[in-house]
Image (cartoon, helix red, strand yellow):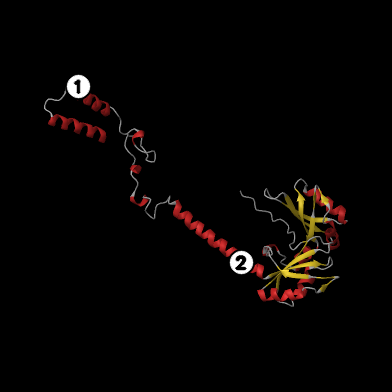
Amino acid sequence: MAAVAEVSGEVAAAKNLDSKPNSESELNVQKLVEMFTKLNPLAKEFFPSSYSHNQNNGQLSPNYFPAADKLPGNDNYPNNRRRRNNYNQGRRRLNGRSFKAQREDSIRRTVYVSDIDQHVTEERLAALFSSCGQVNDCRICGDPHSVLRFAFVEFADEYGARAALNLGGTMLGYYPVRVLPSKTAILPVNPTFLPRSEDEREMCARTVYCTNIDKKVSQTEVKNFFESACGGEVTRLRLLGDHVHSTRIAFVEFELAESAITALSCSGMLLGTQPIRVSPSKTPVRPRVARPTLH
């Protein structure tokens, strides 16, 4: 419409300036005006695709022009992704810094212990280091039949970890232990998984934690493997895995604690195509709670 008005105005101005216009040029201008008047200014190609067009009555939608509170400079603009993303990124950076600070604090409170006798338990190792301060956690790792087992001991404060360094060379079992500052923190166990009663602590004594299980091995095969290798009945078995890790883990509960002790000797044995690792479990295998059906 604006284009038509401009052309019409030019024609009128040309007539005022020249009372005897050139007939050929005037004819060309008139043809141009007629061509513009035949165009539909409400056609969708005349305005951006971001504006909606109401085709029912040929009128422009009220959303043709954005409201004042929707302009990009307004704080209430709902699609202001940059501002919202910057806020989320700042919050993630804050959480990341907080997690890093907690991890570094945990490392400073942890010592690395190596050359641990195969007969030494976590309870005995924790009792040794309790003279240095309160022990929050103690984890023995490695093959239970190897002299080269190692452990991580975490204290309640840094003073306990510093004092623990003086215990290097202490005879524990048949070998002197080596104690060094740790370079890693102990991955915490979810407290809701820990035993809550004396019965559950007794269940832990009959349970082993098995890792590096071949994904092709079924739960029945895991059960049969431990029953034949340990000579005891498996009362509960929880086989866990996901799509991220290439192997699975299992919690195996035996009827007798003696069978669980025997199961520790299965570390390094092939189950499927993978050598498994077996260690005492810190968590009991609780029976699954049946969810109520929805009607």
Q: Nearer the viewer, residue 223 or 120?
A: 120
Across and down, in percent, residue 148 comes to 81, 63
Across and down, in percent, residue 175 comes to 84, 70
Q: Amino acid at mark 2?
A: Gln
Tell me the tag on residue 102: 2
Q: Amino acid at mark 1?
A: Glu
Image quarter (top left, top right, bottom left or bottom right) of the N terminus: top left
Residue 157 shows up from this direction: no
Disc 1 secondary structure class: helix
Q: Is residue 20 left or right of residue 53?
A: left
Across and down, in percent, residue 261 comes to 84, 62
Q: Disc 1 versus disc 2: distance between alpha carbons?
A: 88 Å
Q: Is residue 105 left or right of residue 248?
A: left
Q: Splitting the image into 4 quarters, where does residue 282 fall?
A: bottom right
Tell me the tag on residue 192: none
Q: Is residue 262 left or right of residue 81?
A: right
Contact check, label 1 and label 2, Cβ < 8 Å: no
Among all residues in the image, which is located at the extreme top? 24
**How many numbered marks have been drawn onto this rendered protein structure?**
2
Name which residue lies at 23% across and 34% down: 6
Query: Which tag, 1 or 2, sits closer to the chain's start?
Result: 1
Name which residue lies at 22% across and 32% down: 7
Q: Nearer the viewer, residue 220 or 67?
A: 67
Q: Nearer the viewer, residue 178 or 280?
A: 178
